[in-house]
Amino acid sequence: MFIYLEDTLITDPKLLYEKSYEIRRHNMKTIVKAKLGHTGGDLSVTDILTTLYFGVLNVDPSNPTDPERDRLILSKGHCSGAFYTILAYRGFFPVEMLDTYEQALSPLNGHPSNTKLPGIEASTGPLGHGLPFGVGTAIAAKMDKSPRRVFVITGDGELQEGSNWEAAMSAAHHKLDNLTVIIDRNGLQQGDYTEATNRLEPLADKWRAFGWEVVEVDGHDHAALLDLFQRVPLQKGKPTCVLAHTHKGQGVSFVKDQVGWHHRVMTQEELAQALVELGEVQA
Amino acid sequence: MSEKFDCRDAFGKALEELAASDERVVVVVNDSVGSSKLNAFKKAFPERVVNVGIAEQDLIGVSAGLANGGKRPFVSGASCFLTGRATEQIKVDLAYSHANVKVCGMSSGIAYGELGASHHSIEDIAWMRAIADMTIIVPADPVETYQAMHAIHKFDGPVFLRVSRYPVPVVHPEGYQFEIGKAVQLREGSDITIIANGTMVTVALQGAELLAQQGIQARVLNLATVRPIDQQAILKAASETKGIITIEEATTSGSMGGAVAEVVVQNQPVPMRLLGFPGVFMPTGSVSFLFDYFGLNPAGIEKAAFELLGR
């Protein structure tokens, strides 16, 4: 039987903030140890993921396949470093396993796979896969008349993939108000600014035109994120699009908003400086 | 063997039975209710049809999500678009993720005849065969289509089921039991072996009949399951007969014939001829015209057999 874990959720934004910086520090150490990872994107999405897993989602690490759990799909699967760190801290697998990140035969593959670790709903990495998957599991919840909710986190550059817009149409058509997409809108993709590569703006208008209820939020403001995620759906019968304005590399000055840090790995010296910055930042 | 059937009818009938007995069964379509012959299904189970419109990437992603939500999705659409346009979704969302989704490719092969090569699906088996963990089934007649549907419903994992609209006679004897991964021998013979599946099983039987008139006894195997492949039946044929002809309504590059050749060449090499479409796009023509044009007929089998036997 499903146990609602409300008592285990963190509802104090200050504690969520502290948790997210603890996770950032561990994540950066993991990437440097592995000499592999997506430094900029991990730091961009950490506050969104932390708020969801520690403050919002109805999930039970001791029963990760409970049919009535909420679903979180990380479509930007390359940010596996942040994702695995949060899943481990949330109790889905031992924190020590993070030491095996991207190592030979580790279940902590560079991109998450649902068959390798508990707590992962969808195998992602190829971009534009998460939202169609989210639409499907949201339809299943509607068929079951279940209150479970579905959150999909996409990158912004990822929205250049047409599959997202196929899914956006079908989500609105099927009136999936149990589905929320969160766009990690840091403005950068692997090679350049999104707007210099294949323009996304006016992005909010696009989602509105596709039939979604759109809200914009500071993607690093835990209080605002928590309040918003607790309130969705914002309108009955419509899926919600959260445009979360973020910074790639948030928390580390020399990484922040720099296109070159998509998958660059810090040196030991850079890591030492980053850890100071990540530990010193005050709420 | 005179009356002919459209296997989509057996597909729809089986699906209705499965939906009636298992409330998790849902159908996912890309505006393909009519072309999948699912109008009766839609009438009986309107709430169990998820139509995403003309959007194949979404189609497969949604089906994977439905499986995540506890459903048993059967995706049904024209095979050319389903397998070609959503190949990466089939690979990642279904096969790599071990999603319990059945991908049912309708009107496969060259069933769309005159509509042209853009609408033909002769590559689908090769594409699906390149993806790890995809079970691939190509039924030969309505009996096998119906039974395969029930078998894949019981099977845990992603499956590609290839269904044709080209009318075929019943080729299986009464009491036939389809089993995933098992080839079935439809005719005994010790000179050569003809391995076929789908629409070509009936052609293989006609070819064997023609050869018998020339004093050549051909064994006929229906290899409905392309993966997992029945190595035992193939190697038995390789050791007991003097050569193997494969015949299928698909490209000869990497389809069933290629799969058989991989088994034969690595274990029990015997001469082979692979009949199918030899790496070219079809000229305009009806299905029957194109079958004849490419030698997918009894005469083509006879010619291949003569080559193998040095006549």
Image: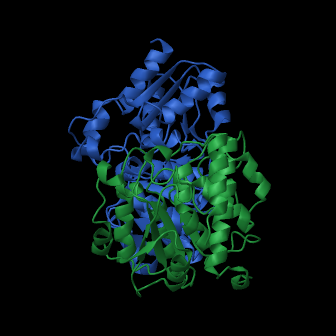
Chain colours: A green, B blue
| Residue B219 point in image, percent of width and height | 56, 31
Residue at x 60%, y 43% (from the top left corner):
A266
Residue B76 visible to an observer of this rendering: no
Hey, which residue is sitting farthest top in the picture? Answer: B310
User: Residue B238 occupies which quadrant of the picture?
Assistant: top right
Q: How many labels does the image show?
A: 0
| Residue A231 point in image, percent of width and height | 50, 85
Nearest the eye: A106 or A44: A44
Asked if residue A257 is positioned above or below residue B69 in the image, the reply reads above
User: Residue A2 occupies which quadrant of the picture?
Assistant: bottom right
Nearest the eye: B152 or A141: A141
| Residue B226 point in image, percent of width and height | 55, 41
| Residue A149 point in image, percent of width and height | 55, 78
Residue at x 76%, y 60% (from the top left corner):
A93
Residue at x 67%, y 56% (from the top left corner):
A25
User: Residue A14 occupies which quadrant of the picture?
Assistant: bottom right
Residue B243 visible to an observer of this rendering: yes
User: Viewed as shown, does residue B242 lie left or right of B305?
Assistant: right
Nearest the eye: A98 or B300: A98
Asked if residue A29 is positioned above or below residue B298 in the image, the reply reads below
**The N terminus of chain A is located in which quarter?**
bottom right
User: Viewed as shown, does residue A39 lie left or right of A205?
Assistant: right
User: Viewed as shown, does residue A151 lie left or right of A282?
Assistant: left
**The C terminus of chain A is located in which quarter?**
bottom right
Hey, which residue is sitting farthest bottom in the picture? Answer: A236
Asked if residue B279 is positioned above or below residue A143 in the image, the reply reads above
